[in-house]
Amino acid sequence: MSRRWRAGLFLLALLLALGLLLALQPPCLILKRTGFYCTGCGVQRMLLALLRGDLPGAAAQNIFMLIFLPCAALYLAAEAWRYGAGKSPLYRSRAFGPAVAAVLLLAGLFTVLRNLPEFIWLAPKAL
C-alpha cells in the first residue's frame, strides 16, 4: 500500500472518529468521578460551536484547545510533508522536548486555573 493510501485512510479514520465522538457525545469521566474539569472538558461543545460558526461560543467552552488543536494539526501537517519529502522529522530536533514540556505545563496550568473560583470563566459553559 502506498504512502498516499495510508495517509488517506488515516485521515478518513480520524474524521470518522471525530464524527462518532460528536454523535455519541460521551461524558467526561474525570468530571464525572472527581467533579473537576480536565483540560479536555468542553471540547465537544467547542467543536459543535465551531461547526455552527460561533467562534466566541467555542472560545467560551475551551479556549486552550481552541488554540492547541489547530497548532497540533499544523505540526502534524508539517511532519507529514517532511516525511513525504524525505527530510528528518521535527520531533528529533532539539527544540521538540522543550516545546512539549511547555505545552504540558500550559495544559496543567489551564486545568488548575479553570477549577479555581476566581477563574470560573475558563470553565466550560452549560448548554
Image (tube, grey):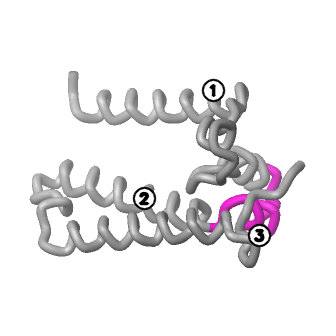
Give residue 81's mark: none
Q: Amino acid at mark 2?
A: Ala
Farthest residue, direction front: 34
The crowding category of the residue bearing disc 1, from other C-alpha atoms within 10 Å (few below 14, some 14 to 19, many at least 20), is few
List x then y, in percent, for residue 59: 72, 66
State the residue in front, 58 or 74.
Answer: 58
Residue found at x 80% / y 69% = 56
List x then y, in percent, for residue 87: 11, 58
The quadrant the N terminus occupies is: top left
Please tell me whether mark 2 sits on a helix, a strand or a loop.
helix
Give residue 20's mark: 1
Please tell me whether mark 1 sits on a helix, a strand or a loop.
helix
Cα distance in 3D space between marks 1 and 3: 30 Å
Disc on the earlier residue, 3 or 2: 2
Q: Nearer the viewer, mark 3 or mark 2?
A: 3
Query: In the image, is residue 100 part of the stretch drawn in magenta?
Result: no
Q: Amino acid at mark 1?
A: Leu
Disc on the earlier residue, 1 or 2: 1
Residue denoted by label 2: 72
Relative to 120, say whether 19 is above or below: above
Q: Which residues are magenta?
A: 52-63
* Tag 1 near tag 3, CB within 8 Å: no
State the residue in front, 73 or 30.
Answer: 30
Farthest residue, direction bottom: 118
Q: Is residue 100 left or right of residue 23?
A: left
Q: How many numbered dots are placed on residues in this image?
A: 3
List x then y, in percent, for residue 40: 58, 51
Please tell me whether mark 3 sits on a helix, a strand or a loop.
helix
Magenta residues: mostly which secondary structure?
helix
State the residue in front, 51 or 121.
Answer: 121
